[in-house]
Image (spheres, grey):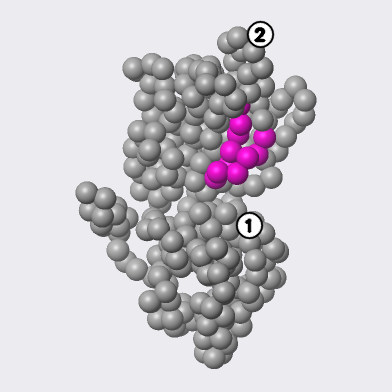
Amino acid sequence: MRKFCIITNPYKDRDFSLTNRMKSYIQLKGGSCHKIAEGEDLPQDAEGIFVLGGDGTLIRTAGIASEKGIPLIGVNLGHLGYLCELEEKNVYAAIDEIMKGNYMIEERMMLSGSSDTRRQDAQFPKKSLNDIVILRKGALQVMELLVSVNGGYLHTFRADGIIVATPTGSTGYSLSAGGPIIDPRARMILITPINAHDLNSKSIIVEAEDEITIELKCRQPEKQERADVNLDGELAMELSPGDSITIRAAEQTAKIIKLSKISFLEILRKRMQIYT
């Protein structure tokens, strides 16, 4: 692997000093490198992507990279996270190893979805590496969300919302809502209610091949009930009572470059020690 591009969060590398140093180092070693901003088209010849920022920057990049099958690796310039393996102190050694071919590719499942609303048939434009979240909008009121799996009724959650997460996303919003931690290499889908008004409501895990349909039910016709649908923290669309969305595993996967042989459980243990 000798042809790279660098995608940088400008708020984390404000003067692009590390970005420029990495680009010069790659070229010095006989490789090629493009420097692009978030949201720009990826170079056609790119073989690998360095993402400078944090887990959020890597998650936003993953959907774009997955469309072209380009692997990526994160350089953490923010808070400690689960996804970014590198830091500024070891990034040059990492470049050397990647250019020598001393790396592995770890594939992470992603989510996609569509919505059959009364107003439109909406296909979500992006893929989600972490989660798709349905969250109440406006007044502080409980929503009723009817969940079906493969066309069969599962449960009606009375809650502030629902998180549908990948194993990668199990350490994100789902974890803070009481969901379990899942090894990111696994293939399964996690359904976690947000502030459920039911003592029996727990997270539910289904197979990666399952299709999950969530319908926003009407509780109070006199009120304009609404819910936002967010993909990896970005607003995708709005639901009204009677609208539904269907979520499934995406055909594409996020390809993460791995240099370290440290297991996910060891990373998890170290992360938990930091906060205890």
**Relative to residue 37, is residue 145 depicted above or below?**
above
Which residue bears the numbered disc 1? 64
Magenta stretch: includes residue 231: yes
Residue 14 x/y as whole percent: 55, 69
Q: Which residues are magenta?
A: 227-237
Residue at which label 2 appears: 222
In the figure, is residue 80 to the left or right of 229? left
Q: Is residue 218 above or below residue 183?
A: above
Q: Mark 2 to mark 1: distance in Å?
A: 41 Å
Q: Within 10 angstroms of label 2, few (less than 14), some, or many (20 or more) residues? A: few
Q: Name the secondary structure under disc 2.
A: loop
Q: Quadrant of residue 263?
A: bottom left
Q: Nearer the viewer, residue 163 or 30?
A: 163
Q: Is residue 237 visible?
A: yes
The amino acid type found where label 1 is placed reads Ile
- Image coords of residue 226 (percent x, y): 63, 23
10 Å crowding of disc 1: few (<14), some (14-19), many (20+): some
Q: Residue at x 63, y 57 (%)?
A: 64
